[in-house]
Amino acid sequence: MNPNVQIIEEKLLSDNWYVLKKITFDYQNKSGQWQRQSREAYDRGNGAVILLYHPQNKTVILTRQFRMPTYVNGNETGMLIEACAGLLDKDNAEDCIRRETEEETGYRVSSVRKVFEAYMSPGSVTEILYFFVAEYEATMKVNEGGGAAHEQENIEVLELPFEQALNMIKTGEIRDGKTIMLLQYAKLEGLI
C-alpha cells in the first residue's frame, strides 16, 4: 500500500445497484505536507470486453443496446454500439468474456487473447477492464445472442465491415470508449 495515503473514513452512500462510497483520506504531497481530501468512488466490479473479428471477411461483431446514462446525458435514443462486454462477477476475466460473448452475440469462441487492461474512469469508478480479441467464423454461431433475459438485456447483434466500423467512430455513430480502443487496437496491430 502507498505510505503517502492514510484512509480516515469510508462512508457508504448507496448500495442500491452497486456500491458508492465517500472516502476521506490524508494524502502526503511531494513537498511532504499532509492534506485531508474526500472523494466518492463507485464500485461496480471489474469487467471484460472483446472484439470479435473475421480477418478473411474483414468484419467485426458489435452490439447495440439501450444505455440509460447516455440517454440522460444527451444521447437522443439512448442506443449505443459497443463491443461485447460484461462484469466479471465471480469469474476470472477469460471465463467471463467467453460467457458474455455467447450470451450477447451467440458466438462460442474457442480461443481468446488478452491484449491489455485499463481503468476506464479512474477519477470516480474503481473498475478495471480486461480487453480481449478473438477470431470468429460462422460455424461458431450457436444461438441468436441478444443477452440474458434475467438481466433484462435486449441486445442487437451487428456484423459490420471493419472499415465501416472505424468510420463510425469519425461520424459519431460509435462513441463507446472501450469499443473505440479495441477497433483502434485492431487497426494498429493489423488484425484485419
Image (cartoon, rainbow, N blue to C red):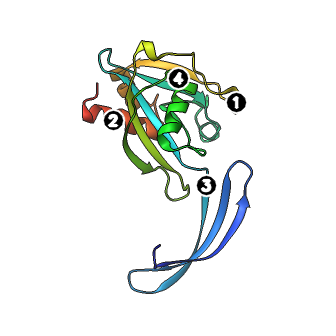
The residue under label 4 is which amino acid type? Thr
Considering only vertical position in the picture, is 8 above or below 99? below
Identify which amino acid the numbered label 3 is placed on.
Asp
**6 to the left or right of 15:** left
Q: Nearer the viewer, mark 2 or mark 4?
A: 4
Q: Disc 1 vs disc 3: Cβ atoms closer than 8 Å?
A: no
Q: Nearer the viewer, residue 50 or 80?
A: 50
Where in the figure is residue 39, as x and y percent of width and height?
A: 59, 67
CA neighbours of label 2 inside 10 A, class few (<14), some (14 to 19), many (20+) = some
For label 4, the crowd category at 10 Å Cα-Cα, with few meaning under 14, some 14 to 19 and many 20 or more, is many
Proximity of marks 2 and 4: CB atoms separated by less than 8 Å: no
Q: Which residue is mark 3?
A: 43
Q: Are marks 2 and 1 in contact (CB under 8 Å)?
A: no
Q: CA distance from mark 2 to mark 4?
A: 21 Å
Measure how far apart labels 1 and 3 are at the Cα level: 21 Å
Q: Residue at x 40, y 33 (%)?
A: 112
Cα gap from disc 3 to disc 2, whole angstroms: 28 Å
Q: CA distance from mark 4 to mark 1?
A: 15 Å
* Front disc: 3 or 2: 3
Task: Give amino acid for label 2.
Answer: Gln
Numbered label attached to residue 184:
2
Residue 122 in view (yes/no)? yes
Sequence-wise, the earlier of marks 3 and 4 is: 3
Badge number at residue 103: none
- Residue labelled with disc 4: 105
Disc 1 marks which amino acid? Gln
Q: CA distance from mark 2 to mark 1?
A: 30 Å
**The residue tagged with tag 1: helix, strand or loop?**
loop
Circle 1 sits on which residue? 152
Q: Secondary structure at mark 3?
A: strand
